[in-house]
């Protein structure tokens, strides 16, 4: 990360960080958190570490963090809509405009492991997987010898046909064929590793979801610890909002089992690029954001790349357990706590970075 020459409001910028947010409500809470930091410092007679910068007509929301080695410009960019496509397009546009050193996606996610990753917890990741259907196929497809090409795994006859996971069956004689992808932002892994201990300790000061919001089946695990927990690991970016325990468990099972992937069985290994690693939570943007970041980071400036871009980090507050969402939201309080906790962790990451050391990487 090179020292910045950009000057804003008379201050030389040490670095620029682009914050990507998917929902307007998440944007609002992030702004409020910055304001709370400023007010708290002023009330305690301290020089505020954060400076709010009133945006001009053509600018996104901005603020400045006063690091020990210089000022860090923070630009908050809200996506037009949810989903990996919007995330890729919006993040690409944001990077092209802001030319950041670091991108952080902040927002909400659903837990894929509710006995471990609980309401109000925060997942920090530089890795995301994508598992999505890319074709609806007819299981009665006929080969030249007159035999059907596919069979569902519950069938017992004709073991020579390609086996299709019966959970992927659709209508009477159709099934969804799936594609697997993953992306990693290796350049930011050390930032997360360096700050993980301090961030984990700070979780004691995070807000805790009301116990009554937790489904009875997971309440014992929730009561076993008194504060939210920080998790570091893989995220899964899905194309739909997951509000089904059955489908949640299906995604977890698929994560560790590729036996029924058609692409693999037909030799198209490149269509199921996958990597070992337990998925902890699911959202709809992490893959798109990290893919955009890594694409522009790896390209030369002459090809539209950003030379100083180090990588991306995803920070997700757990707002639901991918089942009975309406029963766990507690009038919006669960989502509020989850996004606040995620925003606090994102700010903690920004404040934990040694920008002097980072400039030499």
Image (cartoon, grey):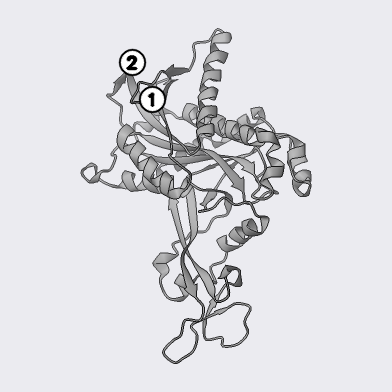
- Compared with residue 9, is residue 150 higher up or lower down, i.e. above or below? below
Give the residue furthest to the front. Answer: 171
On screen, residue 275 versus residue 217, left or right, reads left
- Compared with residue 138, is residue 145 higher up or lower down, i.e. above or below? below
Percent position (x, y) of residue 349? Answer: 50, 32
Which residue is at the front of the view, 166 or 306? 166
Q: Quadrant of the N terminus?
A: top left
Q: Quadrant of the C terminus?
A: top left
Residue lying at 52% horizontally and 58% vertically, measured from the top left: 276
User: Pointer 1: residues within 10 angstroms few (<14), some, or many (20+)?
Assistant: many
- Per the image, the residue denoted by label 2 is 9
On screen, residue 258 versus residue 325, left or right, reads left
Mark with earlier residue (1, 2): 2
Q: Secondary structure at mark 1?
A: strand
Give the residue furthest to the top. Answer: 45
Percent position (x, y) of residue 88? Answer: 39, 46
| Quadrant assignment, res 206 | top right
Q: Which mark is residue 73?
A: 1
Residue lying at 51% horizontally and 22% vertically, measured from the top left: 34
In space, the residues marked 1 and 2 are separated at their CA atoms by 11 Å
Percent position (x, y) of residue 339? Answer: 58, 34
């Amino acid at each position: 990360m090179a020292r910045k020459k950009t000057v804003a409001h008379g201050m030389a910028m040490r670095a620029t960080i682009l914050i990507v947010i998917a929902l307007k409500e998440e944007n609002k809470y992030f702004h409020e958190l910055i304001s709370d930091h400023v007010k708290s410092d002023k009330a305690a007679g301290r020089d505020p570490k954060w400076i709010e910068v009133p945006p001009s007509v053509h600018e996104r929301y901005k603020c400045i963090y006063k690091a020990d080695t210089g000022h860090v410009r923070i630009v908050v960019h809200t996506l037009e809509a949810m989903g990996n496509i919007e995330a890729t397009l919006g993040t690409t546009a944001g990077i092209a405009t802001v030319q950041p050193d670091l991108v952080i996606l902040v927002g909400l996610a659903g837990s894929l492991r509710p006995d471990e990753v609980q309401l109000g917890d925060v997942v920090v990741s530089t890795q995301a997987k994508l598992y999505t259907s890319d074709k609806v196929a007819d299981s009665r497809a006929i080969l030249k010898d007159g035999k059907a090409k596919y069979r569902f795994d519950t069938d017992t006859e004709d073991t020579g046909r390609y086996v299709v996971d019966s959970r992927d069956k659709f209508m009477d004689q159709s099934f969804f064929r799936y594609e697997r992808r993953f992306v990693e932002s290796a350049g930011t892994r050390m930032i997360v590793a360096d700050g993980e201990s301090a961030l984990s300790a700070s979780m004691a000061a995070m807000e805790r979801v009301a116990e009554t919001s937790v489904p009875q089946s997971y309440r014992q695990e929730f009561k076993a610890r008194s504060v939210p927990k920080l998790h570091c690991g893989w995220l899964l970016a899905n194309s739909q909002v997951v509000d089904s325990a059955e489908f949640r468990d299906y995604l977890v099972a698929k994560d560790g089992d590729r036996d029924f992937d058609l692409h693999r069985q037909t030799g198209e290994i490149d269509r199921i690029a996958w990597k070992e690693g337990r998925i902890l939570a699911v959202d709809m943007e992490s893959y798109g954001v990290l893919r955009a970041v890594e694409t522009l980071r790896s390209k030369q400036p002459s090809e539209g790349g950003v030379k100083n871009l180090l990588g991306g980090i995803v920070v997700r507050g757990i707002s639901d357990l991918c089942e009975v969402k309406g029963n766990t939201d507690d009038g919006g309080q669960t989502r509020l706590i989850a996004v606040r906790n995620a925003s606090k962790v994102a700010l903690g990451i920004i404040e934990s970075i040694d920008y002097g050391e980072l400039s030499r990487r």
